[in-house]
Image (tube, grey):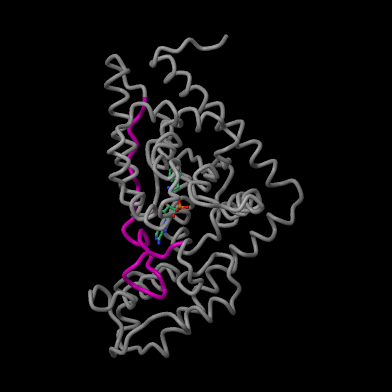
Amino acid sequence: MGKKLILSGVQPTGNLHIGNYLGAIRNWVEDQEKYDNFFCVVDLHAITVPHNPATLATDTYTIAALYLACGIDLNYSTIFVQSHIAAHSELTWLLNCITPLNWLTDMIQFKEKAVKQGENVGTGLLDYPVLMAADILLYDADKVPVGEDQKQHLELTRDIAIRFNHQFGGGETILKLPEPLIKKEGARVMSLTDGTSKMSKSDPSELSRINLLDPPDAITKKIKRCKTDSVKGLEFDNPERPECHNLLTLYGLFSDKTKQDVTTECQEMGWGQFKPLLTETIIEALKPIQTKYKEVMDEQGYLESVLSEGRQKAGAIAHQTLAKVKTALGYSLPI
Ligand code: TYM
């Protein structure tokens, strides 16, 4: 039997932060030898909220370069850009027509983001999860590694596939049901300025997140100013101390230490001792990523060739699935 297929993606909206890394990309890298992997830069999703046309293309390249810099290996993985393969948009339309509207209005992320847009909320934001379902279903993905915030979108993807198969499959499975792959540790990294809200690219405060390309002095400043408390000693899992839990978790993940080891090492520490330790650990962990990023960006034409190859490989699979779906819906395919 062949390897199982993984598909995932990140939006080119702003900088990638350590939440995106720990919740998603690091897990892609760790497991990639076991699977056949497809990682896309989801630039069609990026315009579901107001975006800047002047930076969309460079942001897209930055994310693709960061995939490579974080350790995505082209021997096991394919990297491509969502908008380069028209089948993503086309399947979205077809799936839209079988997706009940209330499934979309019920999505937590839509409700949260729509509030921020006020009256200007676009149809694309409502349709975001159908486009995500199309991304996944086009490749017959077995598993989708994401952070916890994407769990509901994956359940929706499965529901759409079940509905499609039931209505148009004639007893056959046309669209494969994917499984979410959400690791326990790092699936929900919290903001540095509020341990009860998720670290997010859209938080207006830069101090709330550490970006993968932040220089050491920015990381130092952000950790120095991050929210803590005045309790003595450091501990995990105290609901009264969400910041403490989050910062210890970050330390464990970036130093590859277990929760038990971190507890033993840090339980007697004060913030004055812990913060420099965390700062140093994160700076050291991000250094190889930043170095590799620069190498990838400096090699003229390299990224273009990676994405062009990715487009061909991914496009061939996507077009086959799209043809299957269109046939099931009763379309005559062009010869
Ligand atoms: P995006 O760009 O918002 O997030 C990319 C990935 O980062 C994870 N993530 C987090 N993980 C832990 N802690 C956080 N604070 C945190 N913030 C974000 C997200 O869960 C995600 O895995 N809708 C997707 C993009 C997408 C996609 C797909 C993913 C489009 N099509 C198909 C998988 C398969 C998203 O959230 O992008």
Q: Position of residue 227 (x, y in %)?
A: 39, 80
Classify the position of the C terminus by image quarter: top right
Most extreme residue toward the front is 119
Secondary structure mainly formed by the magenta segment: loop
Q: Nearer the viewer, residue 263 or 294?
A: 294
Question: Residue placed at 23% from the left, 78% from the top?
Answer: 240
The answer to which image quadrant residue 84 occupies is top right
Q: Which region of the structure is painted magenta?
A: 175-200
| Residue drawn at (24%, 73%) of the image | 237
| Image x and y of residue 147, in percent | 38, 54
Q: Is residue 77 above or below residue 261?
A: above
Horizontal placement of 157 versus 43: left or right?
left
Residue at figure coordinates x 58%, y 41% from the top left: 81
Residue 167 falls inside the magenta stretch: no
Q: Position of residue 88 (x, y in %)?
A: 50, 32
Q: Quadrant of the N terminus?
A: top left
Hey, which residue is sitting farthest right in the picture? 300
